[in-house]
Amino acid sequence: MEDWWQQLEKAAEEVEGFFKDVSLAMELLAEEVGKTLETFTQEVEEIFVTEVDRCVDDLIDIIQESDFEQDTGFWEDFDHFVESEFTDVTTYKPSPENHPACIGCRNYHGKAYNGNMLVCAMHPYGYEDNTCPDWEPQRDGE
């Protein structure tokens, strides 16, 4: 009977050793995966930053070469487009009856283009309540 008990203890020790080995292997695997992910992330960040910098430099070169600000032809075409597309622009001020949540808000746009009202970028059709969560006070000079 004692032989049976010793074999059972030996089997328990071997199972315990197996689980310790598995645990150690999992820890090593997790460390290796973590290092690999960190290296991959750093490489992606470096490539991304390099590419964005290159694109910004190219854009700056294009702007400098074309003398964009001096080219009045672009602005004349743009003005013509705006005048032809938006012939009926009406400005509205917020009031207690119309868009009360917008009174004194720096985000208020309040223009209707050919009859299509744009209240603000966050709430193009206006905010339904009397207080807007995006309300910001106007700055001096606005």
Image (tube, grey):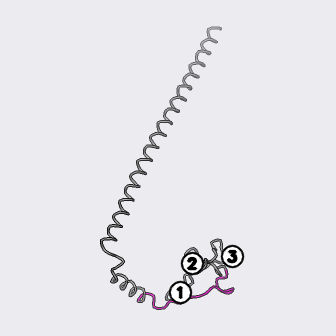
Distance from the alpha carbon under mark 2 to that under mark 1: 11 Å
- Residue at horizontal 61%, vertical 87%? 93
Among the two numbered marks 3 and 1 on one chain, the one whose residue lies closer to the N terminus: 1
Question: Which secondary structure lies at badge 2?
Answer: loop
The kind of residue on which mark 3 rests is: Thr
Residues at circles 2 and 1 in contact by the CB criterion of under 8 Å: no
Quadrant in the picture for residue 81: bottom left
Q: In the rendered structure, which segment of residues is drawn in magenta? A: 84-100
Among the two numbered marks 3 and 2 on one chain, the one whose residue lies closer to the N terminus: 2
User: Quick one: which residue is furthest to the bottom in this view?
Assistant: 88
x%, y% of residue 60?
A: 36, 67
- Residue at horizontal 67%, vertical 82%? 100
x%, y% of residue 37?
A: 46, 43
Which residue was labeled with disc 2? 120
Which residue was labeled with disc 3? 131
Among the two numbered marks 2 and 1 on one chain, the one whose residue lies closer to the N terminus: 1
Which residue was labeled with disc 1? 112
- Residue at horizontal 59%, vertical 15%? 10
Q: Return the residue nearer the eye: 103 or 32.
A: 103
Question: Which secondary structure lies at badge 1?
Answer: strand
Q: Main secondary structure of the magenta part?
A: loop
Q: Return the residue nearer the eye: 13 or 75.
A: 75
Distance from the alpha carbon under mark 3 to that under mark 1: 22 Å
Name the quarter where the N terminus is drawn: top right
Q: Is residue 114 above or below residue 22?
A: below
Distance from the alpha carbon under mark 3 to that under mark 2: 14 Å
Label 2 crowd (10 A; few <14 / some 14-19 / many >=20): some
Residue 2 located left or right of residue 33? right
Name the quarter where the C terminus is drawn: bottom right
Residue 87 located left or right of residue 72? right
